[in-house]
Amino acid sequence: MHRDTVVACCQVKQPDRSIEVTKQSFATTANGLGQLAAWLSDAGVETVAMEATGVYWKPVYYCLEGLFDELWLCNAQYVKNVPGRKSDLSDAEWLADVAAHGMVRPSFVPPPEIRELRDVTRYRKTQAEARAKEIQRLEKTLQDAGIKLSSVASKVWSQSSRAMIEAMIHGERNPTVLAQMAKSRLRAKIPQLQEAFSGRFGAHHALVCRQVIEHIDFLDHSIATLTADATQRLCPFESAVTIIGTGGRFVPRLALVEHENHTCVLPRSAVSHPPTAGGRANSCWETGRRSRTTQTRRDLGLARLRPGSGRRRHDDHHGRAHRGWRETASS
């Protein structure tokens, strides 16, 4: 399966127990995929197995969805052919053969409403990451100009920080005037702010900061729009969102999307604690007859935050487990 073409192999069992194999290549356009569906239907195919390759499998899968009794999306790692000379035709025949003998299991593909929700939430995550990078770029620009705002303020991007940076963009260079723009608890640090703004903020710094701020504003609007759309799409699954967690933020809703909406088949104890949400999943390591369960990322992070916490104890635990593994391996 490629961007422009897809190669199909059809194996049909004949009355004399022989297997009739036919192969054909189709375009991945809407017309070509329609011809593929018709070709498979005319051959009486009941089970269709396809290899997942990048994002190129999606149009093919969506076109064939609902037309056959079974539609399998197979992980490419599980259907790797033996090394050597091969082609798309031989790969298609190999996939048809392993699927016919039950040597590969299909991957889970969520229903259309969950797929749409995933697209929205994953793009929202990308926009949020881009916003964080822009704030880091703003900090780098200020450091290049000798403005030590982050050394005084807890965050480089806040209401006070934005007012000060925008004032510098518009030509204000007096540290006393800039420091007086501080708000709330930051006003207790006006002397430190006056010293922090004694830098060399130039015209090119102002240009970069202006573009960064405009980009952050655009990303804020984009994130808000995507959040509203995802929240509306989650209305039919509000009961599942309530069961998964009450974090108060967008995290429980993202956990629902990535858990493929299979909360109905899980016990309540498992649903109440999604294994991958918030770093709560324990890693289970097993070597030979010995097994150990490590701390979760969440518990380990809390332990490291406590003064005199068990960082050394955690390292010793891993060291003893490693020595035990070597003893087991040598025996």
Image: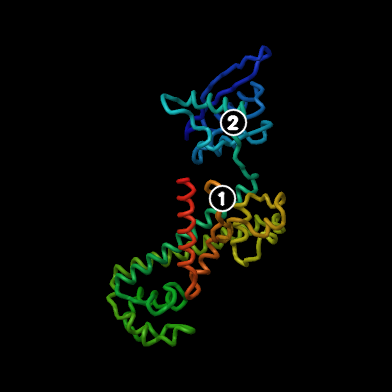
Residue 145 coordinates in the image, percent (x, y): 30, 72
Judged from the image, the secondary structure of the residue bearing numbered disc 2 is loop
In 3D space, how far apart are the residues under numbered discs 1 and 2 (Cα atoms)?
31 Å
Q: Decide: few, some or many residues near mark 2? Use Cα within 10 Å; few <14, some 14-19, many ≥20.
A: few
Residue at the image point whose x is 54% and y is 49% from the top:
286
Q: In the picture, residue 106 is in which quadrant? A: top right
**Which label sits in the foreground, 1 or 2?**
2
Q: Which mark is residue 119?
A: 1
Color encoding of the figure = rainbow
239 and 203: which is toward the camera: 239
Residue 283 coordinates in the image, percent (x, y): 55, 55
Name the residue type under label 2: Met
First in residue order: circle 1 vs circle 2? 2
Q: In the picture, residue 164 is in which quadrant? A: bottom left
Q: Residue furthest front?
A: 331
Judged from the image, the secondary structure of the residue bearing numbered disc 1 is helix
Residue 213 coordinates in the image, percent (x, y): 42, 67
Q: Is residue 323 left or right of residue 104?
A: left
Q: Is residue 39 left or right of residue 265?
A: left
Vertical side of 202 occupied by 97: above or below? above
State the residue position of label 2.
103
314 and 247: which is toward the camera: 314
Name the residue type under label 1: Asp
Residue 54 coordinates in the image, percent (x, y): 49, 40
Vertical side of 22 occupied by 32: above or below? below
Q: Residue furthest top?
A: 16
Residues tagged 1 and 2 counted as in contact (Cβ below 8 A): no
Q: Decide: few, some or many residues near mark 1? Use Cα within 10 Å; few <14, some 14-19, many ≥20.
A: few
Residue at the image point whose x is 42% and y is 73% from the top:
156
